[in-house]
Amino acid sequence: MITKQKGTYDIYGDNAKKRQYVNEILATLCEKYNYTYIETPVFESSELFHRGVGEATDMVQKETYDFKDRGDRNLTLRPEGTAGVVRLFIENKLYGNMSEPVKVFYNEKMYRYERPQTGRNREFTQWGFECFGSNDVLSDAECISLAYNAYKLLGLENITIKLNSLGDNESRLKYKEELVNYFKPHINELCEDCKNRLEKNPLRILDCKVDGDSEIIKNAPKTIDYLNKESSERFAKLQELLDLMDINYEIDTMLVRGLDYYNHTVFEVVLDNSYALGGGGRYNGLVETLGGPSIPAVGFAMGYDRTILAMEENNINIPINDSIDVYLLYVSESEKETAAYLAQDLRLNGYIVENDLLNRSLKAQFKSVDRYNSKYLIILNDEKLTNNEITIKDNKTKEEETIDINNLIDYLNMHM
Ligand code: AMP
């Protein structure tokens, strides 16, 4: 038997239904914020992620699925959503008419070569949204509010936004210098990866998975102590807005996020103060880095699979429809034809309909009515059909009525 690959999963049955339910809630919410749906390709040129995510990031160094296609192109399965969305934004010149910000959302599979464990897979889904064209702190607040409300609407009440500011370029550079000075004397106490990070991107030492809990890292200088006046005022304003919006947040000075492209606001959503369900932030330099004009942006990516896992762990009831509206029963060939056109008519009018596809006896069809948990059953009978009549039965109350076949839709509209 050929089995699925490590770190991937099949989605079917109730799990698939749960995801459909969550998708609908999230899509409706994104639309309330006036974000529009987009899709990007699963694979892109490797260079996009090297430049966009950052050459020195763990993601690019250790986690991407890179391959050459038959035309000898260097390609990568997308490990995250933002770089591809920015490419789409630039390539399709969505910046051409920036009289309003461009707000988009996506729901896509991502690929990272990681060690699979609960909530960490090699193929996983992220829901993400990005807003291009505003540098106003209100757009940071809007982005955080959309992320926050998404989890709330899904019933995850105990979420907290972990919030930090990396400041503008000037603040970030100053902070970087301070970090290098601080870590240099401790270099031999850090892991091999962190030794490399010291020169390439010292910020990343702060979210090292190996050294993360060490005292050296805990006592490291904090970003917010190095914000210049403007960045610091901006951060204070953001907090003021989040307070006004009644969003539960906590300042986490250790939060820098793994990717190169963030500045000012960075945030993560955590549940019960444990694992991250999603993360985002402002990335004002990325559009330009990827060859577009200088356009500010802010965005967020939800770890969709982890969010569903968290809903399950918190016993959040996801309504799963396990019934149908109508089962059509028939025996003869002409009744079967009536079933075919009635099913067509009912389905086009919005009803969930089943009829026997296995050429079985009436007795077997009655069993199907219960298996499908059908609300109504309609028994098609040649004798009655000559008078345009059908018998419809409410499967719960067991009450039955004979009605004119032409009144069926009206009848159901009235009774359901
Ligand atoms: P990131 O793009 O790394 O900031 O990830 C954003 C969110 O995606 C994280 O907070 C996780 O919830 C989720 N995520 C990241 N990597 C994985 C993975 N390998 N498997 C499942 N979910 C993931």
Image: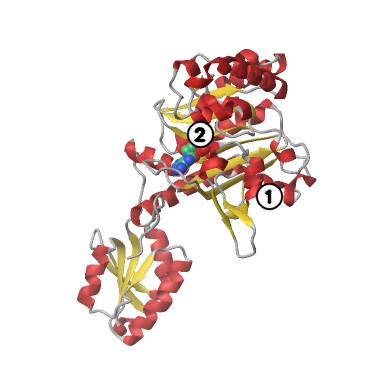
Query: Residue 305 falls in which quadrant of the image?
Result: top left
- Which residue is tagged 1? 88
- Secondary structure under tag 1 reads helix
Along the viewing direction, whichever of 246 and 298 lies nearer the viewer: 298
Which of pointers 2 and 1 indicates the residue nearer the eye?
1
Looking at the image, is 79 positioned above or below residue 149? Answer: below
Tell me which amino acid carries mark 1: Leu
Image side of residue 301 versus residue 48, left or right: left
- Which residue is tagged 2? 149
Looking at marks 2 and 1 on the same chain, the residue that comes earlier in the sequence is marked by 1
Residue 9 rendering spot, x and y as whole percentages = 39, 53
Looking at the image, is 109 positioned above or below residue 275? Answer: below
Label 2 to label 1: alpha-carbon separation: 27 Å
Residue at point 62% right, 39% down? 55
Residue 236 rendering spot, x and y as whole percentages = 63, 16
Is any part of residue 62 visible from this angle?
A: yes
